[in-house]
């Protein structure tokens, strides 16, 4: 498979079109070549292209040397410390959650291992003998 060229369409105002045509005539290239150069530059610099008139190129060069991309923002130390504290707290909560899950799993295993005769279900208490009051739930007045 060869390298296939794709067509890109641009819509610009009539004034900008005339300006682009003048730029192409000054450089003695076609209007299509102006767009190809722009797109090639855009791709080569990963979308970090700033278009400026030639007389402003020196100013733009000075700006780009003092500012880097992506822009860097200074963050207060208190914000960084709070972020670190929250990360530690989240880690602690994850550990507690894992410990709780292990405990619940252990209790379920113990319940599964118990003999079914040792387990008393509340539904069974209501259906039991009236004479066996040791399992009866209620107040002492009912007895």
Image (cartoon, helix red, strand yellow):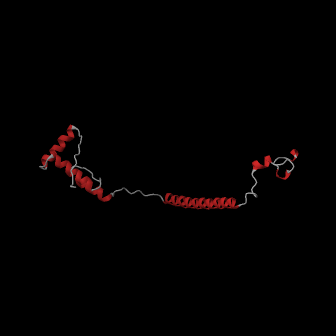
Q: Residue at x 29, y 57 (%)?
A: 64
Q: Position of residue 76 (x, y in %)?
A: 47, 58
Q: Residue at x 18, y 43 (%)?
A: 19
In the rendered image, the residue lying farthest to the left is 28
Figure label count: 0
> If the image is split into quadrants, where does the N terminus sit?
bottom left
Q: Can you say whether 123 is above or below 116 in the image? A: above
Image-based side of 49 in relation to 93, left or right: left
Image-based side of 63 in relation to 133, left or right: left
User: Between 69 and 42, which is closer to the camera in this rendering?
Assistant: 42
Q: Residue at x 20, y 48 (%)?
A: 35
Answer whether residue 54 is visible to the viewer in this image. no
Q: Quadrant of residue 62?
A: bottom left
Image-based side of 98 in relation to 10, left or right: right
Q: Position of residue 141 (x, y in %)?
A: 88, 45
Answer whether residue 87 is visible to the viewer in this image. yes
User: Between 20 and 42, which is closer to the camera in this rendering?
Assistant: 42
């Amino acid at each position: 498979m060869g390298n296939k060229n794709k067509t890109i369409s641009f819509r610009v105002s009539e004034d900008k079109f005339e300006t682009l045509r003048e730029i192409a005539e000054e450089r003695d290239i076609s209007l299509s070549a102006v767009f190809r150069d722009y797109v090639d530059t855009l791709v080569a610099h990963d979308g970090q292209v700033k278009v400026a008139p030639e007389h402003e190129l020196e100013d733009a060069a000075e700006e780009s040397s003092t500012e880097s991309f992506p822009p860097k923002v200074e963050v207060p130390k208190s914000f960084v410390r709070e972020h670190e504290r929250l990360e530690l707290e989240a880690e602690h909560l994850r550990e507690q959650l894992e410990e709780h899950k292990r405990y619940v799993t252990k209790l379920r295993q113990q319940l599964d291992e118990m003999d079914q005769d040792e387990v008393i279900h509340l539904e069974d208490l209501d259906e039991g003998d009236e004479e066996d009051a040791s399992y009866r739930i209620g107040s002492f007045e009912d007895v």
